[in-house]
Amino acid sequence: MMSIVPKPQATELSFEEVAAKYPQFPRLLLLKTDLQRRGVYYTKQALSKVDPAIHQLGGTHIFGTRDGVLTQRPEALILRDGTSVITSPTPLEQNPYIVDFRDGRLVVTDGGVELEEIEYWTKPDYYNLTTSSGIPMSHVASARPQRLYLMPSRYCHFWTDNQGCLFCDIVNNLKRQKTEINLPGRLKPEDVAETVREALKEPGRFTAICLTSGSDFHGAEDFDAEVDYYIEILKAIGENFATPKFPSQLIATAFTEKQLERIYRETGLLSYTPDIEVLNERLFEWICSGKARWVGYQEWKRRMVRAVEIFGRGRVNTCIVAGVELAKPHGFQDEAEALQAVLAEAEDLASQGVSTVYTVWVPRPGSYLRGQKNASLEYYVRLALGLQELRQKYQLSIDHDDYRRCGNHPDSDLARICQL
Amino acid sequence: MSITFSNELVELLTKKDTVKVIATTDALGTPHVVVKDSLQLNESNQLIYFELLESSQTNKNLVHSIWFNRPVAVALIGSGGESYQIKGKPVKAIVSGLLFRDYYIKIREQLGDVDLAAVWVIEPFEVIDQRFDTRSQEEAIRHPYFKHLDRLAK
């Protein structure tokens, strides 16, 4: 792999400096992390190699892109070690990596220097089909190289009271998706059952099913409506399996024990991921005011720990939007301080059986925190190493949210070489 | 590819009674050696093998090798006494896509209800004829001191 022309910020280490300082961090994962941190720009030549009959194009993801455009471009890249990189097309003025086509190959470049050969994701067979009710199956379930991804309800009710998470743009993105590609905001169980049935026909394509939606606090008890809907959807999915349980993950609100016991008992769900988004109570209340109001930081943590008793160790984790803890004006002002605080909270959770993974914060134009800057590459490397070390220390596997079952967490990619 | 395989070596890789072994190391350098019957050549004269188990130590070691550019070794032992060692580096892990699907179908046709974690592509950079006769002749020429004198006595 050739050296990258460094473009350091005033106090940030360049790519090569980070690589030299942390030789234990794989270079391919370092590139993945930085691709997500800085974004990508596809040249015309690179886009000319997109074949809609073969490749998977973006536009249906729950989150929007950095350039705010819904035009279909490759949803993601895959590196030669099988690592996926979900990319956010980014305007050139924001200094993204460039995806180009050179000498018969698709490559990632920086400063004109070729770094790695890449491939585009291939789309699954079911993307060519529509449900009996006329909905394109690609609008019912999105695909990753090995994950079937359902977003049954794309509206988050926290937004109704202007209490959506500040980094999030799902409601603004949904408005655009409804207008431009007629994406349904809420799925019917029968469409889900039919789509999953078709998806499973493709041999070797999927190893897990993941569900995520916006929060819905309605119901006899708070969030019962969200729970009821997930149970409906999970039962519809389960109709297609010969086994009572199937490799699956639910990324949802932190539910009560009673609600979780219902979900676990009544469906084939195997793992649970209530995203806490930011591991700091003060910042949680600022950034996730809806989650803070309806559940609260300490109660969110408590519910995650109790979930371990229901789903088992290694089956409950939480995700944070890494870097948002540095958001202005109320975030940490020092990366070292932020890292220490985040890892301390992550260790508290890990000691009680809850693993933490991260996604790289992508400041999207449709979010409140648009225009801000995410963390340094070094921060993301240290955080990834720290989180994986915690998993090893507390013997927590992360099979359900790893490179293959998800592919969006640089830290859990590290688990590929660990025996847990 | 920087090396060329002899016809004998190519044939060894296709024979069912050839014993095929891969040696890898983990992050601490601990070796791990296992038989991998699926080792074969692809159309680009690279070694490939079908990893059926995601959790296998070989699989993890190969990830480590591709991440940190470390070599692995393959040994081939033929029923006629042929013996070769091939050193190479993993250059690609095929874990998804159309080619993976083809491999997945193929291995399940051959072995039944198995899974496929990855198809590893190993770029060879050295081939060593490990037959005793070959090696002892090489040693006799290059290292004439490496023998006991009683063997030379009248």
Image (cartoon, coloured by chain):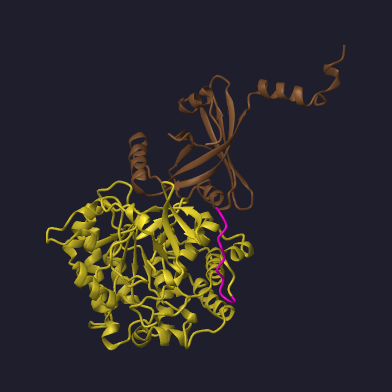
Chain colours: A yellow, B brown
Is any part of residue A404 visible from this angle? no
* Start-end of magenta stretch: A1-11
What residue lies at 55% left-to-right and 58% top-to-bottom? A27
What residue lies at 52% left-to-right and 70% top-to-bottom? A380
Q: Horizontal and vertical percent for residue A215?
A: 29, 78
Q: Horizontal and vertical percent for residue B59?
A: 50, 47
Q: Horizontal and vertical percent for residue B141?
A: 76, 22
In the rendered image, the vertical position of residue B22 relative to residue A277, given as above or below: above
Is any part of residue A24 visible from this angle? yes
Quarter of the view holding residue A137: bottom left
In the rendered image, the vertical position of residue A74 relative to residue B109, given as above or below: below
In the rendered image, the vertical position of residue B72 relative to residue A344, given as above or below: above
Q: Nearer the viewer, residue A381 or A305?
A: A381
Residue lying furthest right in this view?
Answer: B154
What residue lies at 51% left-to-right and 62% top-to-bottom? A111
What residue lies at 42% left-to-right and 56% top-to-bottom? A100
Q: How many marks?
A: 0
